[in-house]
Amino acid sequence: MIISACGKISAVCWRNKGEIKIKKLLNTLYITEEDAYLSLDGENIVIKLPDEQVFQMPFSNIESVFCFSYMGCSPALMGKLCEYGIALNFLSPQGRLLGRLQGTARGNVLLRTAQIKLFVSDDDTINEKVLGLIRNTVSAKIANSCSVLKRSLRDYPEIDSDGAISSCIERLKGSAESVFGMNDKLEILGTEGSAAKAYFEVFDRMLIRQREDFRMSYRTKRPPLDRINALLSYLYTICTCDYAAALESVGLDSFVGYYHELRPGRSSLACDLVEETRCIIERMVITVINLRQIKAEDFEEQPGGAVMLTKDGKKKVLSLWQEKKRSVIAHPFLKQKIPLGLLPFVQSSLLAKYVRGELDEYPSFLLK
């Protein structure tokens, strides 16, 4: 089955120093069948299963493509996607990012030069601007985790019968504030790790339904060892790809980050910006479990203990994520409402302005 976003196209527009930015929220196409093949037909993308053409969509409606198929796509289609600036993401059927294809870099070389000069140091020292970025990112991530807990506690006070949630909230508040007094990256990293450990230790307490089927003791990534971790890892990967495409679209290099270590093949800057918006995914995971939109039968255990979404489970999650992206949020810095799906573009644009010196401080996203 092939899943794509559908529904009304939304847009966000704002003015900054005389410049008007407009960005439309288009469709994201997800190819979930492992034996599907993508090809080109005029101005349309065509998806075929063996001996059968099953889907066709014009390029004008597509923003990005996520391909969970090993069959791949034709060189002609890849060239057309590059021409239109449509990101093509290749993932394993389990949701692991294998690679990403994007067209010619946008923006001018001066922006990327400024980015590299700001983020990369030959002697491993960190300048104050980068340290400020790291502080803001980590503090925002911890504060947003705190907001997720506070939201659940407000809706369901009974989950804090032993005071564990309240205690974690106070600890996270202290951690978020303490980051601004730190001048060492490793110290900030340690604080972030301790806060994340405390947060995920109480994460499954926010579940009021299906508690027997969804339990989580701690965060496990490669591989995920329970159903909650499987959901989180799957959606984190999708979100990171969205941020990588958004960063490239505004002219920044998604591989040159300021917090995550630089590694071949890793979109370090996308990983940096995802940190402050993980809360949206985490809140969604809690919601879809509590509403029974995702159930135990949507997962399967692999040899060795890894837990993965089934084929049908992936389709459900992707549909729910697309629906979530069309929801509207109030952006705290822009002071206007935007579709959630445009948040990666907005944050990438704000970071580009900071790198160019148009903003004195990068405004991290804070959940309200």
Image (tube, rainbow, N blue to C red):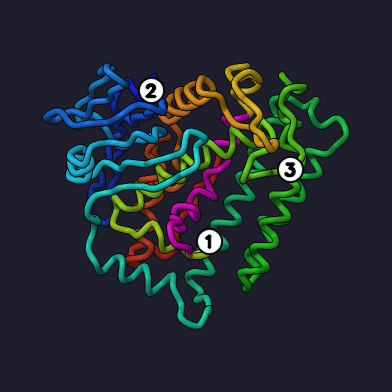
Asked if the residue under mark 2 is in contact with the one under mark 1, i.e. CB atoms within 8 Å, the reply is: no
Amino acid type indicated by mark 3? Tyr
List the single residue furthest toward the front.
51
Which numbered disc covers residue 300? none
Quarter placement of the N terminus: top left
Quarter placement of the C terminus: top right
Residue at image position (50%, 83%) is: 123
Which of the 4 image quarters holds residue 265? bottom left
Q: What crowding class fits label 3: few (fewer than 14 Cα within 10 Å), some (14-19), or many (20 or more)?
A: some
List the single residue furthest toward the right.
162
- The vertical placement of 61 against 363, above or below, is above
Residue stretch in magenta: 263-285
Kindly report the distance in space between the C-alpha atoms of the residues bearing marks 1 and 2: 32 Å
Is 102 left or right of 301, judged from the image as shown?
A: left
- The vertical placement of 343 against 124, above or below, is above
Which of the 4 image quarters holds residue 251? bottom left
Is 245 left or right of 194, judged from the image as shown?
A: left
Query: What is the x, y in percent for residue 242?
Result: 40, 42
